[in-house]
Image (cartoon, grey):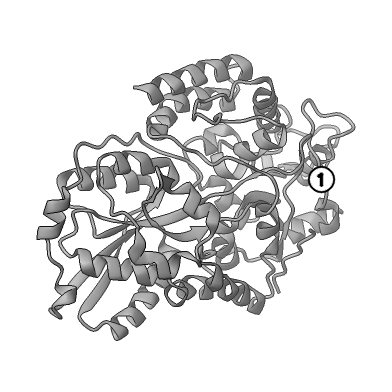
Amino acid sequence: MRSAHTLGRRTFVTAVAAAVALGAAGCSPAAQQQSQSSASTGAPVTVTVRLWDEQVQKAYDASFAEFTKQNPNITVKTVLVPWADYFTKLRTDVSGGNADDIFMMNGSYLQPYVTSGALMEIGSDFDAEKGEWVPAAVEQYTRDGKLWGVPQLTDGGIAVYYNKKLLDDAGITPEQLSGLTWAPGGGSDDTLLPILKKLTVDSSGKRGDESGFNGAKPKQWGYSAAQDLQGIYYNFIGSNGGQFQDDTGKFVFSSAESTAAFQYIVDLINKYKVSPAASNTNDNGDFTKNQFLQGKIALFQSGVYNLKNVSDGAEFEWGIAPLPAGPKGAVSVVNSVIVSGNAKSKNPDATKKVLQWMGSAEGATFIGSTGAAMPAVTSAQSAFTDYWKSKNVDPSQFAKQGGMPAISAPAGENYGAAFSAWKPTFNEIFLGRTPVADGLKKAEAAANKAAAS
């Protein structure tokens, strides 16, 4: 039996890929008025919805089947585009006028689509649904007083999945994972590192805290430290009192506080060998998740967005523990996902009707009731909790963390371009080839230059 011991997604995503640069992809109000939807005439129409998550797609398909029962003239079809190619393809399709009627949107990529007029405004036609939407999600996707999508999924905070057997083998109880702390440079205030060492085992059976341990020949790792924006380094930065971006959107991750946080993560990988080598994780955002599911990582730090993956994929007893706290406490990043309407949809009325359904309690309940994700429609969240309760899993740790202090989620019109600019240097930092302080200064300058372009 699987358990979820709680003591106390993306969905944001684990990484941001290519830069987003849109041309004049939007259409004028006059053009929108000329594009009449068949929804008002009763003629059959098809509305397409583009997604990047296969688990969520199944829930949407069930939701849209019910929608069509209530609206027989509108068929809704989901289109799955893998995350790795999602925003590259979306940029191309929107610019070329070939995008789907509705598409899932992440906050890091929103602004260029707003600026180019590519999205439908979520205005007064949605007043009946807006009262049910998570306020933080509405705030995140509002620009100049206008909302540019319907909130769908919310992550809450980050927590730690654990493998009960690997804990037992090391003589560690789930209760010991509550209240763990990390400290820059280690020392007596650091209770996380000793646990991670004990949970790490080399090929000869030596643990990370034993004499003769050879971290170059790992059998299992204690932790999932990696170049994971949402799951790892934003949280360490926040819990040390640092920022990744300031209030203006400028990148400030080379501060003393942020540098100390990155140094701690890099040391977990390269000095103490309690996490996989960056050569495995730098360009594979799923590596730590997959290793956890294969029983090779004891503690996997991630969000609610991986709850269904863990439940479906783990063949061992597992649970959920709180996020380790730094000098400023357990500070997490919280993010939500929306669906945006295509301003150039050939069926704007039908598209709006589908968006209203997706933002309603009835429509969003399908997402929660499958356990695929936490709905950003508050009255549908009980369905999510009920689903996991039936599986003997308590996901409340994510919500508890989500209610604690948070570091701001990624933002900015050119965040994607900035990511592409800093990524090569981050790769070298995590590989241990570039000193952390020097590398962060170089990466920060490149990021701000790209963001200003």
How would you rate the neighbour count of disc 1 (Cα within 10 Å): few for under 14, some for 14-19, many for 20 or more?
A: some
In the image, taking residue 350 as reference, residue 189 lies left or right, namely: right
Q: Position of residue 360 (x, y in %)?
A: 43, 72
Q: Position of residue 232 (x, y in %)?
A: 62, 41
Q: Is 218 located above or below residue 128 in the figure?
A: above
In the image, taking residue 134 as reference, residue 419 lies left or right, namely: left
| Residue under numbered circle 1 | 180
Name the residue type under label 1. Answer: Leu
Of the 4 image quadrants, the one containing the C terminus is top left
Q: Is 248 located above or below residue 55 in the figure?
A: above
Identify the residue shown where x is 23% and y is 70%: 350
Q: Position of residue 451 (x, y in %)?
A: 40, 25
Identify the residue shown where x is 45% and y is 21%: 448
Residue furthest to the left in view is: 34
Q: Nearer the viewer, residue 395 or 284?
A: 395
In the image, taking residue 136 as reference, residue 170 lies left or right, namely: right
Is residue 399 in view from this perspective? yes
Of the 4 image quadrants, the one containing the N terminus is bottom right
Tell me the element at label 1.
loop
Identify the residue shown where x is 74% and y is 31%: 272
Q: Position of residue 190 (x, y in %)?
A: 83, 35
Q: Nearer the viewer, residue 74 or 41?
A: 41
**Quadrant in which residue 449 is drawn:** top left
Number of numbered discs overlaid on the protein picture: 1
In the image, taking residue 334 as reference, residue 145 lies left or right, namely: left
Identify the residue shown where x is 55% and y is 39%: 229
**Quadrant in which residue 351 is drawn:** bottom left
Is residue 296 in view from this perspective? no
Residue furthest to the right in view is: 188
